[in-house]
Amino acid sequence: MFYRLRTDFRLSIITLLGASAVLGITPFAVMRFVQNDLLAGLVDLFILLGIVSGVLYAWATGDTRRSGLVLAVIASGGSVAVGSVVGEAGLFWLYPCLVTTFFLVHPRVAIGLSVASVLALMMIETAFSSQIQMWSFATTAVVVSASAYVFAHRNHSQRRRLEHLATIDPLTGVKNRRSMDEELDLAAANAERSGLPYALVLLDIDHFKKINDLYGHGVGDDVLNDLVALVGSHTRWSDQLFRYGGEEFVLLLPGVDGVNLRAVMNNLQQVLRKHLKHPGGPVTASFGVALLGHGEGVGHWLDRADHALYRAKECGRDRIVYAEEADSPEPDLASSDPSCAPG
Ligand SMILES: Nc1nc2c(ncn2[C@@H]2O[C@H](COP(=O)(O)OP(=O)(O)OP(=O)(O)O)[C@@H](O)[C@H]2O)c(=O)[nH]1
């Protein structure tokens, strides 16, 4: 529970709104019923039930987008209703609602809801005791909304930047190993559900250390970037490339197997052979390819691709090796005697 609150910002705001509603509105609802003010009591009760249902829905489904919108509408509409039923004492509820709305929905929607709430209250004459009070209320509501907008917008862009930094390899701009783990899990789940074939390619530049040693790290970095650009421009938009570490990459190919997979791999190998270069000549790469087996775990899938890559290196590099089927016995690397078919 605490983990979800720590990692899901919108869920934490929704929960805070729920807790504030229960603690803040319940005493007023009780008081209204005790004072026989049925209408105000029912308004409070409906707002309370609406907010609590929204919070429970968000926790049960994880759909904080939809529940955030519903809660923002309930909170804004509720504060207008309270202001019109109980008059100026109810106006103060709009301020916390204005602020939380900006953290629950997209800023444009929040602006729309805030303007609509303030205008609605201004049109309901019973909400204010004087014109001065009405305009003071409108002005302060605009100031609160503007501040909330700036803060929410900044918070949103910083979170997006952090997410980007956490998932992208800074040198090459492709996704890093962390996002790869997530995407492979998604691929395995999707394969299980839909039966779509998935191929995983471990791609490792040959003798990369020599390139660094001979020409310097800058040239090595350029080779890595060139490789990423070449792979990107010779694969489909649905294929995904990840930097696995150092000079090793993972390419995830959905929807290909059999002859098509071999055609894709041969084409990729030819492209790299032809276009990937360092100042002294061509750069080659070795490939380990594994098709996801039925019900196979991601770790096992990666291991099979890794073993295939190991064999490609053992056989002299610059070649593609296809892993055994997932349900074949594990190749014993220590004693393996790879049959080195031409690459
Ligand atoms: N320029 C550069 N080099 C890197 C980067 N990350 C790792 N390396 C280097 O990549 C080299 C990897 O060397 P090895 O693991 O020996 O692999 P290799 O020389 O390609 O040999 P094989 O894979 O067996 O063909 C090391 O020298 C690392 O310093 C990077 O971001 N930029």
Image (tube, helix red, strand yellow):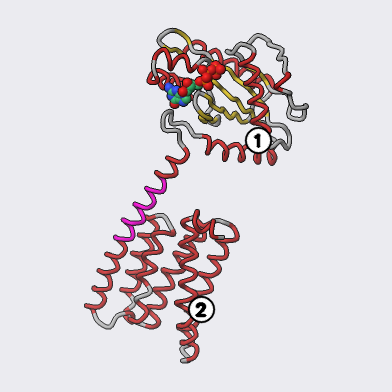
Name the image quarter holding the C terminus. Answer: top right
Q: In the rendered structure, does residue 159 fall within the stretch colored magenta?
A: yes
Q: What residue type is labelled 1?
A: Gly
| Mark 2 residue CB less than 8 A from any atom of ligand 1 | no
Earlier in the chain: of badge 2 and badge 1, it is 2
Quadrant in which residue 333 is drawn: top right
Q: Position of residue 7 (x, y in %)?
A: 50, 53
Find disc 1 in the rendering and name its residue.
299
Residue that appears at 53% across and 65% down: 55
Instruction: Please say if 211 is above or below 253.
Output: above
Q: Main secondary structure of the magenta part?
A: helix
Q: Position of residue 62 (x, y in %)?
A: 56, 56
- Secondary structure at numbered mark 1: helix
In this rendering, does residue 104 appear at all?
yes
Find disc 2 in the rendering and name its residue.
45
Quadrant in which residue 309 is drawn: top right
Q: How many marks?
A: 2
Residue that appears at 38% across and 69% down: 96
Magenta residue span: 147-160
Name the image quarter holding the N terminus. Answer: bottom right
- Secondary structure at numbered mark 2: helix
- Report the disc number at residue 281: none
Furthest-front residue in this view: 334
Q: Where is residue 312 in the image (x, y as percent from the top left)?
A: 63, 16
- Give the side of residue 311 with respect to residue 210, left or right: right
Q: Which amino acid does label 2 sit on?
A: Leu
- Assess disc 2: are there few (<14), some (14-19) or many (≥20) residues with their C-alpha within 10 Å of its C-alpha: some
Instruction: Please say if 82 is above or below 32.
Output: above
Q: Nearer the viewer, mark 2 or mark 1?
A: 1
Instruction: Please say if 112 is above or below 37.
Output: above
CA gap between label 2 and label 1 equals 52 Å
In this rendering, does residue 234 appear at all?
no
